[in-house]
Image (cartoon, rainbow, N blue to C red):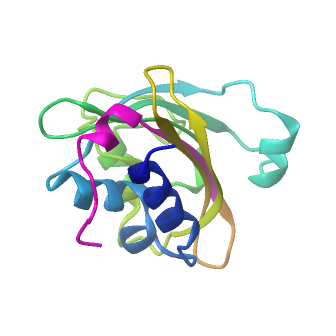
Amino acid sequence: MSGEAEELARLLAGQDPGPVEKAGATRMLSVIAGGPVTAEMHVHARPLLTARRRRLLQAAGQDVHERRGRLVDEHGATVADTTAWVVTGRVPAGARLALGITPDGVRHADGKGTPLGSALAGCGVTRDQGPVTLEPAPCGGSAVVSAALLRLIGGTPLALVHETVCARWLAAHPPPWPL
């Protein structure tokens, strides 16, 4: 296992629940990258959703959309693969515009590649970090796999997020990190 992966896993797992702009993985990865991290996402309206995910999202009878893609650094290198299952009707209007989705979760032409956590900054959304694991990466080394639940003010679930940080990218950005 790589020291970079172990350190990032320790930092993610040690985060207390907090606002996405302070506790989000994308924020942490941007600091490690030393510059902005953006999203290249595909949005799928009404994906098949497991019963467990629907239960975690408290989304019975609600439309959910899936955001699947990758986070990239300013040089175009893949930082992480990410998937988020988002309860569409709960997304704040201002965040919808930044995410480039319509109220029913369909992507429109104005999408700017904004990561989910960045679009939700300032909306009162918090991130509850879930399990963080180290898994063998296909290209060698260890990938950091993270899951989190994003919540609206009052605790209502908004999104379930799954991130797999690229081992090769992480190895190119060794600690110490200014976090």
Residue, x 25% and y 57% (percent of image)? 32
Q: Is residue 173 magenta?
A: yes
Q: Is residue 11 left or right of residue 158?
A: left
Q: The C terminus lies in which quarter of the figure?
A: bottom left
In the image, residue 121 sits, relative to residue 16, either above or below, namely: above
- The answer to whether residue 61 of the structure is visible from this angle is no
Query: Residue 39 location, x and y as percent?
Result: 31, 37
- Number of on-image labels: 0
Query: Residue 76 location, x and y as percent?
Result: 18, 29
Q: Is residue 86 magenta?
A: no
Q: Is residue 78 left or right of residue 43?
A: left
Q: Is residue 120 left or right of residue 160?
A: left
Residue 78 quadrant: top left
Residue 150 quadrant: bottom right
Q: Nearer the viewer, residue 80 or 86?
A: 80
- The answer to whether residue 132 of the structure is visible from this angle is yes
Residue, x 47% and y 75% (percent of image)? 124
Query: Residue 69 location, x and y as percent?
Result: 43, 28
Magenta-tinted stretch:
158-179
Query: Residue 144 location, x and y as percent?
Result: 51, 45
In the image, residue 139 sits, relative to residue 164, either above or below, namely: above
Farthest residue to the top: give it. Answer: 138
In the image, residue 123 sits, relative to residue 87, either above or below, namely: below
Residue, x 21% and y 40% (percent of image)? 73
